[in-house]
Amino acid sequence: MPDRTTYFFGNGNAEGTKDMKDVLGGKGANLAEMTNLGVPVPPGFTIACDVCIAYLRDRAVPESLRIEVASHLARLETVTGKVFGDQADPLLVSVRSGAPMSMPGMMETILNLGLNDRTVIGLARASGSARFAYDSYRRFIQMYGDVVLGVPHHTFEQLLSSKRLMAGVDSDSDLHEDHLRNLVEEYKGLVRSTTGREFPMTPVAQLWGAIEAVWKSWTLKKAQDYRKHAGIPDSLGTGVNVVSMVFGNLGNDSGTGVAFTRNPSTGERTFYGEFLVNAQGEDVVAGIRTPLSITDMAERFPAAYDELLETQDRLERHYGDMQDIEFTVERGKLYLLQTRIGKRTAAAAVRIATEMVAEGMITTRDAVLRVPADQLDQLLHPIIDPSVRATPIATGLPASPGAANGVAVFDADEAVRRAGHGDAVILIREETTPEDFHGLVAARAVLTSRGGMTSHAAVVARGMGKCAVVGCKEMVVDHERRACTMNGTTITEGDWLTLDGGTGKVFAGDLPTTPSEVVQVVRGTLDSRKAPAYQSFERLMSWADEVRTLKVRANADTPHDARVARAFGAEGIGLCRTEHMFFEGDRITSMREMIGARDEGGRRRALAKLLPIQRSDFEGIFEAMRGLPVTIRLLDPPLHEFLPHGGEESKLLARTLGVTRGELAHVVESLRETNPMLGHRGCRLGITYPEITEMQGRAIFEAALRAKRRGIDVHPEIMIPLVADYREFDHQRAVLEEVAGKVLGSMGESLDYTIGTMIELPRAALTADQIAQRAEFFSFGTNDLTQTTYGLSRDDAGRFLPAYMERGIFADDPFQVLDQSGVGQLITLAVAAGRRVRPQLKVGICGEHGGEPRSVKFCHAIGLDYVSCSPYRVPIARLAAAHAALESSVQ
């Protein structure tokens, strides 16, 4: 236990400041700061946050702390002129939590503490209102009974509801004194029958019960879940704030409210909030009564409103950020109970940051740091209309944000068919494979019962900017019946669903969505001059680009994706996956002909059909990215993924290939592997079938020269995948160099190009110096590198990784957030080894981690040249890279 644990504030002086959040918690530090500023704050004291952690460890209250609290309580009595437990005019206090990082509503609060059967009489006499005194008493018993004694909240609410019904009133504020006296006795009886003990009547015992309950609330599941979501360490603990009570429920000259110095939804510079007359703070939050707009307060309490208006402006300017304020008016006098940095939407965050720069309140550097990078997702994807109230039928992993609605379909072909008729569809699968690609293109969103955040469905959906919810374990898919069941609700084909990819929630029915203004501008459907949200977004991103040193590229497989990526600010393509080009239209047939061919001649004939298709796609991508580098990965997945596994498709393919269905089945079976992700794929395919590498190399070189002849500045980078040994790289490079010589020679042109590799195996990372003697760039495929380092299947790990995180074995899903101590060390070693032999070696990452802010900061710290991510995560990566640059500059 530290030497000092308790800090006082009151009468214009405080023993803390806003810079002591780690010690006092956010609420305590800001109460102290407001006191020092001369803002009207009820006096009180704060118990430091580290006391919470010590208490939870030892489960005991040191005697020294009890003495210190008693001393501060006596000081509070002196300042207020009231005595704790006095039967004539008692001092009452609130006991509230306050962690170093804001966790609104996640921990406990108790109001009106100090009331008992005797002090309530003194409160009635001193206030002149017995009704007010017993209303305060019943509130205290309910809060204390719930929080400290464990009496279920709803049992109190049942008694309160019955009392309103018996009294024939709709609101608690309409209950008379006699009703409230009776309710107090009923509440005490409920405590007695539930706990087997009388409600505690000693104020000091009440106080310590409340303090310990606040400490214990740090471990509540909702608090733990919030910290996990917000990335708040469990080791911080919460402060405890003991503050003298001021009352908003003294009558019609009193009230309470919550306000924001700007609109937290839109960012508009207008005072925004709500208040209630004759109420305490819990009434505003609980929604029991309909609150009034903050502007109505000007008419009800004009003097207090004017003071509040001046105070909120002063606080915003003092803190340099939008404030969330809690206040109470007691018989016309204003008191502030809290100020903190206000939570806001992404749209509001961007607008507030840019407007505060224009107002001279903050610098452009402050503005860039003010907006969380991952929050930009909200700006880039549609959302469910906030005015809609609906209950989800299931929840999965939020794989790709945004909202989407459509009719349920259960296979890719049906998705294409219905979409072709103009239907909005949501593709539902147990899990998706590359064979489902056309269905993913046609669908508005995808929902799977299996898979993780880097599963096929998740990666492809993010790349296309489509909503995805994956790993929905509550969903049972019955493909035979073309239906699925979620927690008792059955969805059959054609039923409407709405997905929220930002939260992972699944809703039955067609809920309205709100489109993203930023995306409309990027797609060219909205003039940027008519899009103020986009203008603020672009202004902020331009400031971010001025300070970041880490380049940001995009993973894009089509000219359309490349154009979208460039519109979002991508500085090149870091990963073009050539296999996705084979799944459109008739292309898959030619690919299957190549796989099913009996000899090299047959494979070459099929590849000749694919050559012009690949060449055209590459030329379109070079055109979209003119002047910027384009990294093209050679064929990577195992061949069996391109083949049908029965049904009409198998019959049609057998007819096309001129073989029997039995012979085709033999081909399919011959390609089946026990562990295909570690099997015949990547450079291993190119070594076994060099004609595949030849065709792809020819398509790249010819496309680049055609684009160059049209005046397009091209920078092709050819990436050889899944290299484990430098000799594999040598083989594939030799094939590509031979093709390049033939193409360039026949066309009489020169071309600057580079050949590098994808580091996605631990052995490649450990022998990076050998590979770097031959490779001109490294791109770390962190999806597979994570998989092979951990020995985890990324598609199957979703079944047990949540349990690992719940039990604290893993802090994060390693497929979502780069594992810096394991996978990150392999990357660091590989970069250092590679640059020792090739100092100018270009290095980047192209896995899904390239768009995750913490991973981006790691990439900046170890000196990578770029990150590459899905087009719709490019702005997030740009902002995260700027944060990394700014934060490292002050360390």
Image (spheres, grey):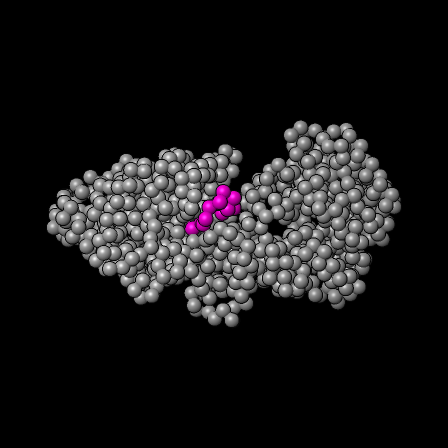
Q: Is residue 454 shown left or right of residue 890?
A: left
Q: Name the spot of residue 765 as percent of width and height, x first.
A: 39, 37
Q: Quadrant of residue 88?
A: top right
The quarter of the rendered structure image containing the C terminus is top right
Q: Position of residue 829 (x, y in %)?
A: 44, 37
In front: 842, or 564? 842
* Camera-nearest residue between 170 and 716: 716
In the rendered image, the vertical position of residue 585 relative to residue 201, given as above or below: below
Quadrant in the picture for residue 508: bottom left
- Left or right of residue 350, residue 197 in this image: right
| Residue at (60% x, 38% y) in the render | 234
Q: Position of residue 289 (x, y in %)?
A: 66, 57
| Residues rendered magenta in the picture | 856-868
| Quadrant that contains the N terminus | top right
Question: In this view of the protein, which residue sits in the foreground, 220 or 771?
Answer: 771
Tell me where residue 249 appears, x and y as whole percent: 76, 54
* Residue 865 magenta: yes
Residue 291 shows in this picture:
no
Out of 531 and 365, give the one closest to the viewer.
365
Q: Residue at x 75, y 62 (%)?
A: 310
Residue at 18%, 52% in the rendered image? 606
